[in-house]
Image (cartoon, coloured by chain):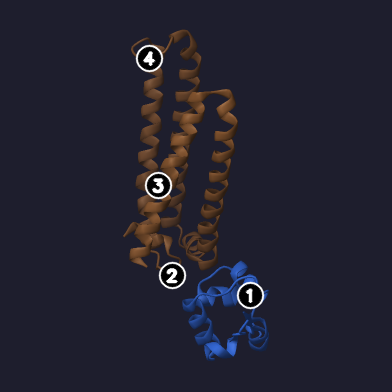
Amino acid sequence: MKNRIQELRREKKIRQEDLAEAVGVTRQTIISLENGKYNASLVLAHKLARYFDRQIEDIFLFEEE
Amino acid sequence: MWLNQLFTDEPVDFERRCRTRIKVGMGIAFLGLLSLAVMVLFCSQKLTVLYPESEGRDFFATFYGSLGAGLMAGGIVSAIKNVRYLKDPALKKRQKVAETDERNRLLGLRCWAYAGYTMFLLLYVGILVSGFVSRTAAMVLLTVTGVYALVLMLFRIFLNRVM
């Protein structure tokens, strides 16, 4: 699943460390999310959506196979 | 329930986890001390083994001595680390994030799963090879594999009910 985390983070001009701290995960998790190596859980997706003040579907782009 | 911690979306009470680890660490250190005491008793001829003592003497002292020292060191180190987490707020915060991070938790579970698959495969290879070397070894490995498969099946049934 693709996501716009890196794009939104850059828009907000924040570092990966700051985003990680805000949503309670490690920086490595943010890196993996941005690289598309890891898919966030529903809880983390909600936290990220709240942090960026967006809907989940604006951040995570669901693609049917 | 304790097993709930296996689910990556379950919240973790980090302080409670640290306190539990301190107790477990001290328990493990005590077991290590017990093992050392057994070694000392054996070396001072107050205990004996069920096989020819000439074969067992060196093994017994080395095995129980190393086991005891290892358990004591591991238990004490674990307890000290967790006391430090509870006393130092910055360290506690960093460690809490590292331990409750959902990717880290998933990684941990996957490591267990892959280690399990590998162990099963190794046991199978061990059974095939040991049949040519020692019947006792083959039977022990076969029993371990059987118990392993049984535990796996029981967890499958249990988890199927709770999730």
Question: Are discs 4 and 3 both within one chain?
Answer: yes
Q: Is residue B83 visible?
A: no
Query: What is the drawing colour of chain A?
Result: blue
Q: Which residue is mark 1?
A: A16
A26 or B79, which lies in front?
A: A26
Cα–Cα span, label 3 and label 1: 45 Å
Chain ID, mark 4 = B
Which quadrant of the rendered structure holds the N terminus of chain B? bottom left
Chain ID, mark 3 = B
The residue at the far left in this view is: B1
Q: Which residue is mark 4?
A: B50
Mark 1 burial class by Cα count in 10 Å: few <14, some 14-19, many 20+: many
Cα–Cα span, label 4 and label 1: 62 Å
Name which residue type carries label 1.
Gln
Which quadrant of the rendered structure holds the C terminus of chain B? bottom left
Q: Nearer the viewer, mark 4 or mark 1?
A: 4
Q: Residue at x 43, y 9 (%)?
A: B52
Secondary structure found at label 2: loop
Q: Are marks 4 and 1 in contact (CB under 8 Å)?
A: no
Q: Which residue is mark 3?
A: B150
